[in-house]
Image: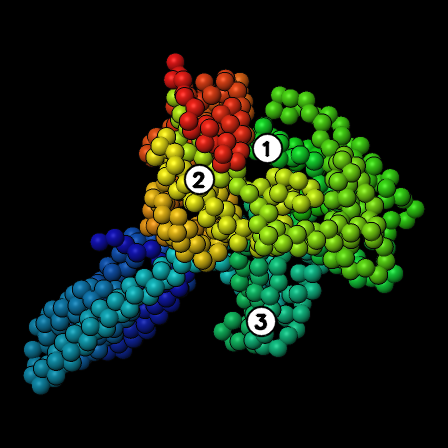
């Protein structure tokens, strides 16, 4: 059975019991020596001397350093022998003494009772049995002893031994439970993320939990008040002294919290949260109890979240939220003159399309560093999003805002190497400033000025002028004209052929809307689609285009025998896709035209799907139940994900023209197109390449295995009559 090591409490207990036992042994032996000296015959009285010496020796034993010795299991085991030897010595004395039969059992019982406090039940019971055996020897020397006395004494002795054995066993169980609880508590404290420090009134450390090894890297025994003071960060030391002083002088039971930095054993700094409780008036403690928790990770996370909340992760500049907050504070001061510059990069989308998004990110980072070098430390430079930056200048002093804008443009125009190419970047800058203007007004004015700079040809700046509101009026006028155009049917639908790439045979057409403006002539979608989308007019316009396309497909199928399998593709705008009546509109347009739903393909961009993937999936499944086919337009320009391709009922992937333009000359574009084609084949999806303009592009796409294509090489968007001629024209099979 493994021997349990003694803790401080156990060592103290054993030392006290041994001293008590030694003193009682001194008392019994002394009484025995007196009995011998007073009652024994003269020739036997010399036994009083060794008895007295033995008593004094046992008395001196009490002065030995038992607290240290009893920690050794061998010493504790040897003590049993001491107790055992006491009984035969006592029996020998009682055998010779006339009153031995009377005092033997009480003295032996006292020895057994003393053993109960230290030894196991088996040892105590053994001592009891040895005592009874010794009593039998003593009775042999006193034949005339009363039987009643013998029976009474033995009965008392037996009961006392049994009770002592039970007590010893119960005590041992309690000790084991106590040690188990202490081990459990120590394990909890050792593995606890908190350190408990008990400090005296003078600041000395009375106790510290073992978890200090984990939290600070110091051994508990080495932690002193002086050490704690040296571990506190110098900047935090005055505050911590004040906190401790206030806590000591507070009312009993008061709890106070603070944060501080402490140096770990390895020299690093940890941020700790300390909760102190005043227990100076508690008679069991009379101390300050401080619970310390390492919150370095939490602090680091808070700082990271703060940076994420108020800084741009790509450039490290302030973000829109922080810019607006500082703008609000700046404009909130009386008579403050605040200037705002909005900086929008020109043609940044071309960089992303041609060089990739990594190159675009590198460009933004480089330009942000240039802008940062050109502003004062007190100014706020922010990236508002995408390729748009903003500069807040509080108290412009004598500086000319136009000069600031020109200097920033000059920095941005400097050439740089990007993706192995030397490029120059330009920007359009809008400048607005003044007094007694709100932050929103300043941003609106700067935004108007920035768009004015773009209308001037880009690569320029513009100062806000109240006349710029005219552009807002123009936008409103365009919305009115769009409403009238819908009512007066000024829109027309043109159709661009979609061909089978191996044979160049027309397999379908894509419906594209145009506006036959009464004054400006035929307008492409880029002149009005944005306004239609913003105003919501895109929903009725899209509904009209869909119905026109379905009716034209039905007409071709009736009148052109060459087009029995012709398919019609129709684009859905974001606003139209989110419209609750979309499914009903599609179902009605197909039913009214009398065409096969499987001949209609609805095209949706990736960005539209990702706005709300769950809602998008529900809408697409509803459209699929009608029987139409579904295509993802401009695939690869958004966040292309296998996950949503798996979830959504998609039939076609349309490869954006950005990847097609240089597919025959650029290895990266070729690899991207090849990946999309392979993905389509793996998922059993058709692939359509957009923007094919050269034979080289067509040849490369055909070799890569792309199914279909469209572009100026096969035909521009034209009216329906021109498509009639293309359908009837003979097709030369590709080699």
Relative to 659, is 687 on the left or the right?
left
Query: Within 10 angstroms of label 3, few (less than 14), some, or many (20 or more) residues?
Result: some
Relative to 39, is 409 on the left or the right?
right
The residues tagged by marks 1 and 3 sit, at their Cα atoms, a distance apart of 58 Å
Q: Does residue 204 appear anywhere in the picture? A: yes
Q: What element carries label 3?
A: strand
Q: What element carries label 2?
A: strand
Q: Tell me the number on the disc at residue 516.
A: none
Quadrant housing residue 83: bottom left
Residue 28, image x, y percentages? 29, 73
Whichever of labels 1 and 3 marks the residue nearer the N terminus, that label is 3
Q: Mark 2 points at which residue?
A: 569
Q: Mark 3 points at which residue?
A: 255
Location of residue 365 with respect to 265 vertically, above or below: above
Q: How many marks?
A: 3
Residue situated in front as seen by the camera: 728 or 390? 728
């Amino acid at each position: 059975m493994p021997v349990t090591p003694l803790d401080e409490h156990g060592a103290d207990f054993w030392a006290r019991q041994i001293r008590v036992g030694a003193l009682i042994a001194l008392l019994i032996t002394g009484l025995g020596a007196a009995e011998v000296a007073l009652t024994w015959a003269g020739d036997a009285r010399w036994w009083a001397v060794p008895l007295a010496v033995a008593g004094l020796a046992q008395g001196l034993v009490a002065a030995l350093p038992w607290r240290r010795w009893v920690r050794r299991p061998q010493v504790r085991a040897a003590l049993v022998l001491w107790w055992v030897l006491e009984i035969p010595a006592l029996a020998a004395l009682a055998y010779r003494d006339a009153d031995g039969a009377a005092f033997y059992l009480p003295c032996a019982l006292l020895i057994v009772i003393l053993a109960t406090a230290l030894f196991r039940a088996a040892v105590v019971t053994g001592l009891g049995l040895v005592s009874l055996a010794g009593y039998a020897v003593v009775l042999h020397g006193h034949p005339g002893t009363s039987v009643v006395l013998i029976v009474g004494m033995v009965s008392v002795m037996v009961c006392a031994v049994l009770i002592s054995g039970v007590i010893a066993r119960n005590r041992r169980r309690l000790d084991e439970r106590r040690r188990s609880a202490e081990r459990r508590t120590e394990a909890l404290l050792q593995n606890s993320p908190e350190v408990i420090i008990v400090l005296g009134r003078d600041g000395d450390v009375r106790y510290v939990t073992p978890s200090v090894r984990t939290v600070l890297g110091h051994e508990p025994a080495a932690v002193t008040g002086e050490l704690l003071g040296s571990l506190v960060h110098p900047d935090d030391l005055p505050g911590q002294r004040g906190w401790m002083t206030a806590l000591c002088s507070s009312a009993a039971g008061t709890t106070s919290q603070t944060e501080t930095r402490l140096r770990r054993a390895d020299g690093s700094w940890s941020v700790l949260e300390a909760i102190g409780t005043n227990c100076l008036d508690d008679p069991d403690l009379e101390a300050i109890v401080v619970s310390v928790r390492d919150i370095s990770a939490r602090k680091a996370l808070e700082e990271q979240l703060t940076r994420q909340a108020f800084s741009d992760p790509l450039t490290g500049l302030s973000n829109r939220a922080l810019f607006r907050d500082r703008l609000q504070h700046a404009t909130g001061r009386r008579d403050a003159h605040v200037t705002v510059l909005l900086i929008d990069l020109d043609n940044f989308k071309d960089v992303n399309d041609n060089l990739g998004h990594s190159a675009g990110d590198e460009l933004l980072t480089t330009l942000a560093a240039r802008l940062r070098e050109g502003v004062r430390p007190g100014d706020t430079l922010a990236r508002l999003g995408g390729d748009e930056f903003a500069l807040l200048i509080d108290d412009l002093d004598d500086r000319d805002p136009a000069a600031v804008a020109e200097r920033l443009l000059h920095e941005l125009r400097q050439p740089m190497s990007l993706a192995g190419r030397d490029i120059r970047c330009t920007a359009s800058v809008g400048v607005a400033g003044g007094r007694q203007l709100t932050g929103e007004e300043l941003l609106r004015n700067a935004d108007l000025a920035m768009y004015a700079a773009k209308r001037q040809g880009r690569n320029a700046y513009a100062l806000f002028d109240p006349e710029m509101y005219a552009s807002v009026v123009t936008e409103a006028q365009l919305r009115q004209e769009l409403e009238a155009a819908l009512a007066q049917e000024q829109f027309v639908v043109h159709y661009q052929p979609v061909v089978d790439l191996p044979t160049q045979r027309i397999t379908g057409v894509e419906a594209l809307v145009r506006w036959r403006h009464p004054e400006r002539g035929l307008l492409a979608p880029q002149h009005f689609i944005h306004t239609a989308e913003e105003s919501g007019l895109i929903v009725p316009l899209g509904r009209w285009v869909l119905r026109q396309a379905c009716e034209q497909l039905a007409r071709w199928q009736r009148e052109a025998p060459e087009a029995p399998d012709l398919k019609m593709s129709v684009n859905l705008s974001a606003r139209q896709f989110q419209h609750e009546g979309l499914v009903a509109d599609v179902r009605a347009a197909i039913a009214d035209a009398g065409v096969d739903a499987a001949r209609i393909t609805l095209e949706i961009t990736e960005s539209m799907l990702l706005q709300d993937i769950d809602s998008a999936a529900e809408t697409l499944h509803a459209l699929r139940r009608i029987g139409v086919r579904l295509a993802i337009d401009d695939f690869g320009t958004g966040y292309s994900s296998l996950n949503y391709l798996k979830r959504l009922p998609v039939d076609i992937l349309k490869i954006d023209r950005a990847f097609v333009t240089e597919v025959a000359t650029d290895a990266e574009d070729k690899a991207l197109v090849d990946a999309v084609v392979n993905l389509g084949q793996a998922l059993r999806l058709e692939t359509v390449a957009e923007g094919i303009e050269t034979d080289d592009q067509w040849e490369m796409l055909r070799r890569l295995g792309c199914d279909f294509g469209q572009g100026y090489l096969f035909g521009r968007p034209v009216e329906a009559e021109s498509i009639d001629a293309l359908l009837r024209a003979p097709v030369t099979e590709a080699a």
